[in-house]
Each structure stands twice: as structure tokens, then as C-alpha cells.
Amino acid sequence: MGNEKNSTESTVHDTDTYLQSLIVTNPLQEPIFRRVIHALDLPPGSRGLDVGCGIGLQAIMLGEAVGPGGHVTGVDLSPEFLDCARSFAEKAGISEQVSFQEGNMNNLQFDDDTFDWVWSANCAGYAPGEPLPLLKELARVVKPGGSVIILAWSSQQLLPGYPVLEAHLNATSSGIAPFVEGTAPELHFPRMMGWFRRAGMKEVTARTFVGDVCAPLS
């Protein structure tokens, strides 16, 4: 019993700590996310799904992008994150356009062909294992002709004019983050276009967005 109690206390503490880190760091990434969302040119009035929505800041930006006639549903496993997301949406005055519900991205509780598009940032592909079943699940809930949008970050160093130094820096553990050492190369994000094709998706494209995210000093 003692071990179970300690484990529970540790889990609660870790959730609270991670929640606070998201509240601090997510706004720092907002300029990059807004650039990405603007580039997507989401159809006004469309219906979208944010898988692994966390504290909801991206879902709010997506809701703003689709406008009053559209709607974005955010899904996450954590009730604590979802409570925070609802609070942010209410403060942003966008609760009518954005809603949140608890759910597992590997087993979405939606019918086939429900959404015009699905978005997943810094979530899909991070869990260990084969990403193909997840991509097929995301594609299942998207209408024919819709889009599955996966956004992932990389810490690769870009040093134009210094290819050798750039290659050395990117060969370090910090240069390949967030990849886990020992993971099969085909499961790394640079191979993502292959994942989409294997999942049977058409018109697969990729685009790189470069930006700086500076953490607070405290």
C-alpha cells in the first residue's frame, strides 16, 4: 500500500508540474503556431479536430482561424489539461467555437468522415512504437478530400555556409532531439512523409518552419 500511495502522489505531482510547464512554455511558441496555421489557410466554417490538444492554446488559434461558422474539438487524455483548456477558451471568448473532451488518440470516439481536417502538434508520433495505426485512425475521422496535419519539432542546427559543422552538431544527442536513442530510423520525424504514404494518404507534402523559442529565466 505504501508503494501505491507514493506512486500516486508522484503521478499527481508530475502532472501538476508538467501542466505548469505547459502554461509557461506554450505561449512562447505562439508566433510559430500562428505562422503554421496561417499557411494552412483552413476553410472558414470548417470543422476540425485537435488531437493531443493539451491546455488548448492551439485549438483556440485554430478556432479563430475557422471563424464563427466553424468549430474545433480538442481531445486529450488528461482531465487536468482539459479543465485548463476550457478556462483559456472562456477567457479568449471563443467557447462557442472550441470544445474539449477526454479521449484516446488511438481510439477516437467519432464516426468515420466526421471532420474536415485533423491537427496534431507535438503529440502524434512521439509515443514509442509504429505510428501507422495512429495515422490510419486520424484519417478515419476525416472526410474524403480532407487533411491530416502533423506538426513536429526538431532541434536540428541550421548553419548556412558551414555544412561540416552543421553535420557534427546534428549528430549529437541534442541535435536529434526529441528522438530517443535506439529508436529505429524509420520512426524518426524526417521519415514522416513515408508514414503518410503507407497509411494510404494522397498528395503528401511537407514544409519546414524555423523559429526561436527562448525559455524564461525563472
Image (cartoon, helix red, strand yellow):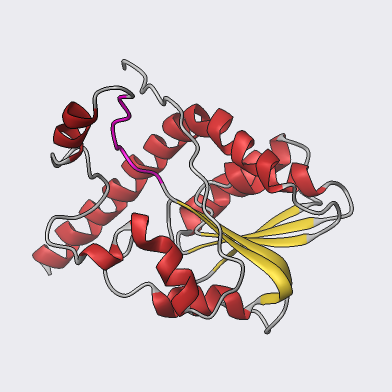
Q: Could you tell me residue 167's position as x and y percent?
A: 19, 36
Q: Is residue 66 left or right of residue 176?
A: right
Q: Quadrant of the C terminus?
A: top left
Q: Could you tell me residue 116's position as x and y percent?
A: 74, 67
User: Does the magenta-highlighted stretch encompass residue 69?
Assistant: no
Q: Residue reaching furthest right?
A: 69
Which one is in front, 115 or 7? 115
Which one is in front, 197 or 17? 197
User: Does the magenta-highlighted stretch encompass residue 156?
Assistant: yes
Q: How many marks?
A: 0
User: Which residue appears at 12% of the width and 70% of the height?
Assistant: 1
User: Which residue appears at 14% of the width and 42% of the height?
Assistant: 173
What secondary structure predominates along the stretch shown in magenta? Answer: loop
Q: Could you tell me residue 8's position as x and y percent?
A: 24, 60
Which one is in front, 11 or 5? 11
User: Which residue appears at 30% of the width and 22% of the height?
Assistant: 161
Q: Residue reaching furthest bottom?
A: 112
Q: Is residue 4 left or right of residue 32?
A: left
Indicate whether 40 appears above or below 110: above
User: Which residue appears at 61% of the width and 67% of the height?
Assistant: 203
Which one is in front, 16 or 65? 65
Does the image show residue 57? Answer: yes
Q: Could you tell me residue 125's position as x and y percent?
A: 38, 62
Q: Over which residues does the magenta segment extend?
A: 153-159
